[in-house]
Image (cartoon, rainbow, N blue to C red):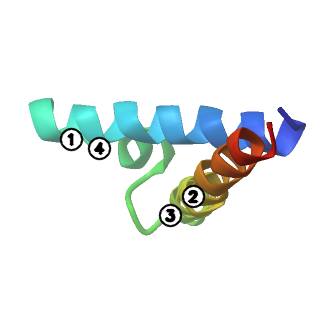
Amino acid sequence: MRLIDRIAMILIIIGGIYWGLIGLFQYDLVAGLFGGQDATISRIIYTLVGLSALWCISLLFRARDYEEAE
């Protein structure tokens, strides 16, 4: 697994935990740590997690390609 794949997976896991906090406790951890949802750093974190999710879509198709090649 390439480094970018691992980074994307880690960010997706963090994003999942983040959404769990929102769903269970109605607490926005990113906004709480970095000064609100509109803060620049918060928006960067939200964007990175979203881009990681898009990148991980490619992992689904690459896994299928590896299985078909064998």
Q: Is disc 1 placed on a helix, strand or loop?
A: helix
Residue 58, placed above or below residue 70: below
Q: Is disc 3 placed on a helix, strand or loop?
A: loop
Q: Quadrant of residue 55?
A: bottom right
Q: Quadrant of the N terminus?
A: top right
Task: List x then y, in percent, for residue 52.
Answer: 62, 54
Q: Quadrant of the C terminus?
A: top right
Gap between marks 2 and 1 measured at Cα: 23 Å
Residue 66 appears left or right of 17: right
**Residue 39 got which mark?**
3
Residue 28 appears left or right of 3: left
**Residue 57 got which mark?**
2
Q: Earlier in the sequence, mark 2 or mark 1?
A: 1
Residue 15, placed above or below residue 51: above
**Residue 22 got which mark?**
1
Gap between marks 3 and 2 measured at Cα: 28 Å
Question: Mark 1 near mark 4, Cβ–Cβ under 8 Å?
Answer: yes
Q: What's under tag 4, amino acid-wise?
A: Asp
Q: Is residue 48 visible?
A: yes
Residue 49, placed above or below residue 6: below
Q: Earlier in the sequence, mark 3 or mark 2?
A: 3
Task: List x then y, in percent, for residue 56.
Answer: 61, 52
Gap between marks 3 and 4 measured at Cα: 13 Å
Q: Earlier in the sequence, mark 1 or mark 3?
A: 1
Which residue: 58% across, 50% down? Answer: 60
Q: Is disc 2 placed on a helix, strand or loop?
A: helix
Gap between marks 4 and 2 measured at Cα: 25 Å
Q: Earlier in the sequence, mark 4 or mark 2?
A: 4
Question: Mark 3 near mark 2, Cβ–Cβ under 8 Å?
Answer: no
Residue 29 appears left or right of 47: left
Nearer to me, 31 or 20? 20
Dot 2 crowding, Cα within 10 Å, few <14, some 14–19, many 20+ = few
